[in-house]
Image (cartoon, coloured by chain):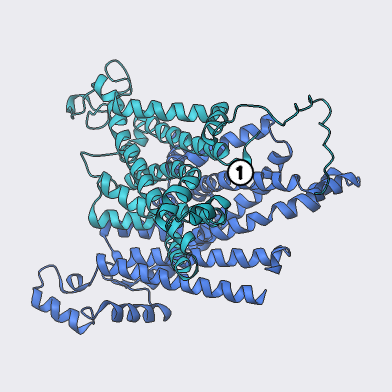
Chain colours: A cyan, B blue
Amino acid sequence: MTNIAPELPPPGLPAAPEGGEIGPVQSGWRLAFREFAQNRLAVLGLAALIFFVLFCYLGPLFYHGTLSSSLESTTLPPGAGHPLGTDNQGFDVLEELMVGGQSALEIGFFSALIGMVIGAIWGAISGLAGGLVDGVLMRIVDVLLSIPFLFVVLIIAIRYGSSVLGLSIVIGIFTWQVPARLVRGEVLTLRVRDFVSAARAAGAGQIRLMNRHLLPNSLGVIIVTATFSVADAILAVATLGFLGFGLQFPVFDWGDMLNNGITYLQDGYWWLVYPVGICIIVVVMACNLLGDALRDALDVRLRRR
Amino acid sequence: MTAYLIRRTLTAIVVLLGVSVFIFLMLHVIYPTPAIQVLGPHANKFSINQWNRQHGFDDPWIVQYLRYLNQLLHGNLGYSYKLNQSVLALFQERWMRSAWLSGITLFLSVVIAIPLGIYQAVRRNTVGDAVVTTGAFVTYAMPDFFLYLIAIQLLAISFPIFSFEGPQTTSMVSIIFNWRAMTLPIVCLTLLDLAGYSRYMRSAAMDTLAQDYIKAARAKGLPERLVLLRHLVRNAFLPMITLIGLSIPALLAGNLVCEAVFNFPGLGLLFYNSLGTADYPVLLAYTLVGAVLTVAGNFIADISLTVADPRIRLV
C-alpha cells in the first residue's frame, strides 16, 4: 500500500495517542496465559485434571478402604464404610478408583512424553534437512500412521504382557507421528524467518539452531498435541483393559474395573460400572477441553487482541 | 491433474510397501515360525529345525519377506494353524457382515451430521447449538464400550426392547432384517461417529458462512433457504469428503470393540477371539487389511476431493 495519509480511527474509538499504541509489552507466554485464564471451560478442565491427580495420588493416603479382598463383604451397595460399595472380591470401589487412576494417568502422561520427544526431534530433523531425508522420514510417518494403532498395541500386549512402562512405550511409539508432522510444518515456516537467518549468519550450527530457535518456537504445537495424546492414551488403555488384555494384576486401571463390572450388569450392580465410566469420561473430556483452550491461547493467529 | 494423480499413486504404493515391511517384521519377530503348532508342543528341536528348513523359515529375512510379499500379491493372507483354515477364507466368511454394520452406520451418521452441523453453524451460540455441542463433546470423550454398556443396561436389560447380542445367524438377509438385534449396535456406532462428524461439519459450515460468496448471495436477495442449499451445503461438504475417505477403513476393520461387546459375528469378533488364542497370522493379516484400507481411503479421499473441488485441480 502506498497510502501514507494517517488513517482515521474508526468511529466510536478514541484516537490513538501520538507515537502509536501505548501499553505494557507482554511476552507471548503471558498473553497466552491471560487468554487461557479467560476461557472458563479450560479452567474447569484444568481444575478437573488437578482434582484427579490429587484424588489418585493423595487420596489413598487419607482414605483406607479395604484394598485387600475380604470375602465377607462382596458386592456391597454404596453405604456406610464403603461410599461406592465393594466389588465381587470385596475390594472397596472408591479406593480402586484411586489406584486404578494412577496407572491411567501415568500411562497417559508417559506415552505423551515419549511421543512428543520423538515427534519433535523427528519433525525438526525432517524439516531442517529437506530433500531426500525429509521424504524418507515423512514416508515412514505415513506408513506408521496408516497402521491401526489399537490393533498393534493389542497384539504386542498379548505377546509381551503389559506393564505401565511397557504400555507407555508401545502407545508412545504410535503417538509421535502427528506431532512429527506438525513440528515439521512449523520448522518449514520458521526456517526461512529472519531471526533464523540471523542465527545462521551468526554461525549457529544445526543442533544449536534446533535447540535454541526451532524447537522452542514449535513448543506451542507440541504442548497442544501432547494434551490430546494424553486423552487418547487413557482411552486406549481403558479399551485394552476392558477387552481383558490390559495391565496384569495387581496393577490395574479403570478399563480393567469396567471389564470386571460388565459381568455383573444383569445383577444390577451399577456401582461397579458407572462411577468408573464417569471418571474416564471426565478425565478425557478435561484433557480435550484443555487442549482446545491451549490451541486457542497458543495459536497467535486465533488470538483475540 | 495427471501429474498429480501419478505422484499421488506412487506415494500410495511406496506407503503400501512400507506397511507390508512393517507387518512382516512384526510377524517375523513375534511369530517366526508355525513349526510348534504344526508339529505339536512336544516336538524336539531337531524336527523343528528340519521343518523350518523344509518350509523356508530359516532363510534370511529378506528372502522370507519377498516370499511373503509374493504370497500377498497372489491373495494369500496367511494360514491360521489354530483354526486350520486359510486367513482369506476366514475373512471371506465374515467381511460382508462387518461391511454392512459399518456401511449403514457411516451412511446414517453422514446423513444426520450434515443438517445437524449446518443447523449448529447457522444458529451458533444458541441453546440448541450448545446442547448438541455438549452432547457431541461428552460422546467424543466417552470410551465407546461404555456407551455400549449403558445402551445394553438400559434398552436390553432394564427395558428389554432390544437384544443385548448381535444376530447370530450367518444369512445376510436375516441379519439385515433382524432389527431387534441390530438396532443397538447401529445406534451406538452412529452416535459415536456423529460426535466427530457434526463437530467437523459445524466448523466447516462456519468457515463457509464467513466467505464472500455467501454475503454476495445474500446481498443479491437470494432467499436464505437457497443460500444454504446452493452455496453453503455444497461448499461445506468438501471437507467431509476427506473425513468419509478416512472412515473407509472402519467399514471393514474398525468395529473391533463394538463387535466384541455385542458378539456380532464379523471381522472384529474374529480379531477379538484370535487375541484370546494368540493366533498371530490372523491378527497381523487383519492389521494389514486395516492399514491397506487406510491407505486406500486416504487415496480415494484425495482423488475425489480433487474431482469435487475444481480449485484444487490446478495443483
Is B241 rendered above or below residue A269? below
Quarter where residue A279 is shown: top left
Nearest to the observer: residue B296 or residue A275: B296
Return the x and y of residue B234 as percentages of the image width and height.
74, 55
Element carrying mark 1: helix
Relative side of B81 to B48, left or right = right
* Residue A188 visible: yes
* Residue B259 visible: no
Which residue is the site of mark 1?
Answer: B199
In the rendered image, the residue lying farthest to the top is A80
Which chain does the numbered disc 1 sit on? B
Residue depicted at 57% across the width and 34% down the height: B134
Give the total number of marks visible in the rendering.
1
Relative side of A119 to A169, left or right = right
Residue depicted at 53% across the width and 75% down the height: B10
Return the x and y of residue B224 as percentages of the image width and height.
84, 43
Relative side of A258 to A214, left or right = left
Return the x and y of residue A204 as percentages of the image width and height.
44, 55
In the rendered image, the residue lying farthest to the bottom is B54
Return the x and y of residue B139 as percentages of the image width and height.
52, 39
Is B132 rendered above or below residue B193? above
Q: Residues within 10 Å of mark 1 (few under 14, many from 20)?
A: many
Is B295 rendered above or below residue B244? below
Residue depicted at 51% across the width and 53% down the height: A182
Residue depicted at 23% across the width and 44% down the height: A248
Quarter where residue A69 is shown: top left
In the rendered image, the residue lying farthest to the front is A202
Nearest to the observer: residue B173 or residue A291: A291
Q: In the rendered view of the protein, which quadrant contains the C terminus of chain A?
A: top right
Instruction: Give the amino acid type for the residue marked by disc 1 in the picture.
Output: Arg
